[in-house]
Image: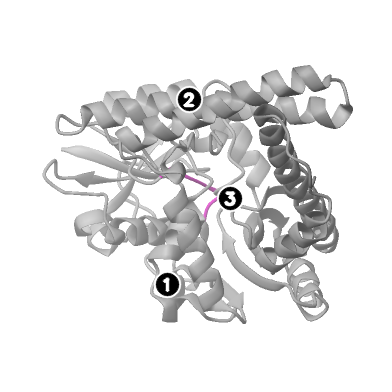
């Protein structure tokens, strides 16, 4: 039997089985005290991949959240992605969570322990860093194709009229393109600075990605203290209402998918820069919309 | 606490994200049936990276005015030949420009 790993949490529950917040309603129920987090009630545990119960394996003062996985089960599916996110989201209600990268599977428990042992210091450091914080994803679209066209047109008059040697002609064409791209990026930088100015003052950390496509001006992640979340959302609303032709998308609150760093090695097992996008791409469109609270 | 996805332009964002997804291959597809293509893709990706770096460096030098006309001609001729050779190789192995990229996980994309 393999182990599918969902996350590391900042809790080391007694015993090896942990029924965890089965649904948001239940997790808010005052009757669900620490007393409930015992070995009993496995049948109530949140279900993971292939409907297997999710449980926690303790390691020192942290917990590894896993479910058993039949070797035959194909895990690279849309259902797995949504299930992974569902488990992490349920955990997030009660613990500080370091989500694992999708499809993290260990054939042997010993291998998993070895990995956790090697990264233990990192985990503790990351858990401290992201405690009481949530991640928000921001995407901004601008009319990149139109802006680029405008820049290209402005450069058209500068083209040389006389014939030239092949190498120089090639270099001039390339240089024109280089200047257009540079100007385009500088314009993007100016817009991003304005957008980021609104949001970053309410965030403790941020990650910005510029121009993943010509039209996708910004894909950003902000790590926001729980107590500043309302301010952050207000700033987003303010930005949205004054953003002119820009189009905005906010998603979250997410666990800190994009703010987990490993100092000793980069093996791509934790978080993942494209995990939120992957989750959003696999959710049904009607589930994408909704309002907080 | 419930999760929100808030936008007035959901379809536009969905389309743009779809483009990003398509542009970034997640892994090298190497298996017994297409080992040659998988290897060619990896090698050509690295060559393309180096070629683009050389080209960018040349542009910076042109911009800074540190190349003579003769040097520009020689560099231009070399870069043109490299570009044409790459086009040939991509055609031979049936690879498109957007396939010559690698996702390096936490490090982002190669190009």
Residue A219 locus on image (x, y percent): 64, 56
Tag 2's secondary structure? helix
- The residue drawn where x is 25% and y is 57% is A42
- The residue drawn where x is 43% and y is 64% is A281
Q: Residue furthest left?
A: A72
Specify how the rendered protein is coloured.
Answer: one colour
Question: Which mark is in front, 2 or 3?
Answer: 2
- The residue drawn where x is 61% and y is 37% is A126
Residue A60 locus on image (x, y percent): 46, 29
The residue to which callout 1 is attached is A26
Measured in 3D between alpha carbons, the distance from the residue under mark 3 to the one under mark 1, in whole angstroms, is 23 Å
Question: Which mark is in front, 1 or 2?
Answer: 2
Specify the quadrant that holds the C terminus of chain A: bottom right
Q: Residue furthest right?
A: B65
Tell if the residue under mark 3 belongs to the same chain as the one under mark 1.
Answer: yes
Residue B69 locus on image (x, y percent): 81, 22
Specify the quadrant that holds the N terminus of chain A: top left
Label at residue A256: 3
Asked whether B2 or B58 is in front, the reply is: B58
Q: Is residue A95 magenta?
A: yes
Question: Which mark is in front, 3 or 1?
Answer: 3
**Is residue A219 left or right of B46 when viewed as pictured?**
right
Name the dominant secondary structure of the magenta segment. Answer: loop
* Any part of residue A33 in sight: no
Measured in 3D between alpha carbons, the distance from the residue under mark 1 to the one under mark 2, in whole angstroms, is 52 Å
Tag 3's secondary structure? loop
């Amino acid at each position: 039997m393999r182990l599918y790993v969902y996350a590391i949490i900042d809790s080391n529950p007694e015993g090896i089985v942990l029924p965890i917040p089965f649904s948001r309603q239940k997790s808010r129920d005052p009757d669900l005290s620490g007393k409930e987090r015992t070995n009993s009630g496995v049948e109530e545990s949140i279900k993971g991949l292939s409907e297997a119960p999710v449980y926690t394996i303790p390691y020192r003062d942290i917990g590894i959240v896993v479910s058993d996985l039949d070797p035959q089960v194909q895990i690279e599916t849309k259902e797995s992605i949504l299930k992974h996110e569902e488990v992490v989201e349920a955990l997030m209600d009660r613990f500080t969570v370091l989500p694992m990268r999708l499809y993290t599977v260990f054939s042997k428990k010993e291998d998993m322990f070895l990995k956790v042992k090697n990264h233990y210091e990192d985990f503790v450091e990351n858990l401290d860093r992201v405690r009481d914080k949530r991640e928000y994803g921001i995407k901004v679209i601008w009319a990149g194709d139109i802006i680029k066209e405008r820049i290209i047109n402005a450069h058209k008059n500068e083209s040389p009229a006389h014939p030239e040697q092949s190498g120089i002609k090639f270099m001039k064409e390339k240089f024109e393109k280089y200047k257009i791209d540079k100007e385009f990026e500088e314009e993007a930088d100016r817009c991003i600075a304005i957008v980021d100015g609104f949001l970053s003052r309410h965030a403790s950390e941020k990650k910005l990605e510029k121009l993943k496509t010509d039209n996708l001006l910004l894909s950003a992640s902000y790590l926001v203290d729980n107590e500043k979340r309302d301010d952050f959302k207000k700033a987003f609303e303010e930005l949205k209402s004054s953003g002119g032709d820009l189009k905005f998308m906010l998603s979250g609150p997410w666990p800190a998918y994009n703010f987990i760093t490993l100092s000793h090695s980069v093996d791509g097992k934790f978080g993942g820069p494209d995990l939120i996008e992957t989750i959003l791409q696999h959710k049904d469109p009607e589930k994408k919309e909704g309002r907080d609270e | 606490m419930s999760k929100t996805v808030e936008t007035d332009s959901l379809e536009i964002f969905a389309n743009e994200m779809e483009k990003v997804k398509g542009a970034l291959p997640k892994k090298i597809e190497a298996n017994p049936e297409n080992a040659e293509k998988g290897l060619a893709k990896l090698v050509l990706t690295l060559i393309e990276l180096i070629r683009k770096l050389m080209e960018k460096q040349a542009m910076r030098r042109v911009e800074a005015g540190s190349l003579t006309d003769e040097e520009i001609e020689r560099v231009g001729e070399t870069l043109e030949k490299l570009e044409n050779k790459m086009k040939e190789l991509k055609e031979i192995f049936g690879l498109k420009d957007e396939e010559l990229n690698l996702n390096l996980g936490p490090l982002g994309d190669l190009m």
